[in-house]
Amino acid sequence: MRYLKATAQDRSGNGKADMVILQFFEQTANEPDELVHEAVAIDITADGVADILLPGDINFDGCKSAEDKALLKAFADTFLKQGWFNAGDTWRCYLTMQVSHWAKSGIPNTIKLSFHRCCSPRGKRILVYTAAGYDGDSDGVLESFTNSDLDQNGIADHQDKAAIKVLCNAFLAFAWHTPPLKKP
């Protein structure tokens, strides 16, 4: 199974997220999760928009291109605004994203966003809240999204759904998912 771990940090100490680190992991049974790729976006002007983009080949198409930068920027600009970040260079709050349901044709039907927080020095993590995007007709387009208060302003509104949509569509564009193996 493949999943994305996104961590935002306030490295400048101004109370706003200014760095987004995306880590692409591959999980294999009975093995530690393997970090396959990492991408970084930095907001040096504290305006909630990434100014420096270090995507590498974030969509795994074999080349580094403007498309890679655009995908990282779309994800990072949205994630920076959600208020889910760490003080300094800590890693206690993070988001994981993965395909949680597949259509019979192998198309992702559900993208799950899980917001975690580590609450103890030993690293015990808790799931704080979740959100999801759904492709109801298996056409490769996410049509519906959960009512989740992504930006933590106390209201699950249109802005939250728009953010979920951007994050889910970016995740799909990263192509960091594989359909489950078919049983013989």
Image: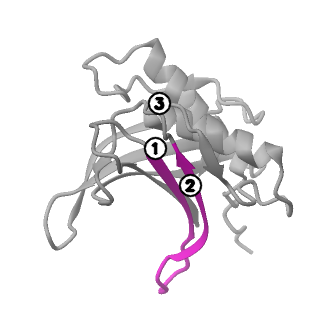
Question: Is 129 on the left-hand or right-hand side of 82?
Answer: left
Residue 157: image location, x then y, percent:
40, 14
Crowding at mark 1 (Cα within 10 Å: few <14, some 14-19, many 20+): many
Look at the image and tell me whether residue 77 can be seen.
Answer: yes
The nearer-to-camera label among 3 and 1 is 3
Q: What residue appears at the point 58 percent right and 67 percent down from the top-left corner?
A: 1
Instruction: Indicate which disc residue 113 carries.
Output: 1
The residue at the point 49 percent across, 22 percent down is: 161
The label on residue 158 is none
Q: Which residues are magenta?
A: 19-42
Cα distance in 3D space between marks 3 and 1 = 21 Å
The colour mode here is one colour
Q: Tell me which label, 2 or 3, sits earlier in the chain.
A: 2
Q: Residue at x 37, y 27 (%)?
A: 148
Q: How far apart, in angstroms, are the residues tagged by discs 2 and 1?
A: 19 Å
Magenta residues, dominant SS class: strand
Q: Is 152 left or right of 21, judged from the image as shown?
A: left
Indicate the secondary structure of the residue bearing disc 3: loop
Residue 171 locus on image (x, y percent):
63, 45
Q: Do labels 3 and 1 touch, CB within 8 Å?
A: no
Spatial CA distance of label 2 from label 3 is: 15 Å
The residue to which callout 3 is attached is 48
Q: Which residue is mark 2?
A: 40
In the rendered view, tell whether residue 115 sits above or below residue 46.
Answer: below
Does label 2 or label 1 sit earlier along the sequence?
2
Label 1 sits on a secondary structure element that is strand
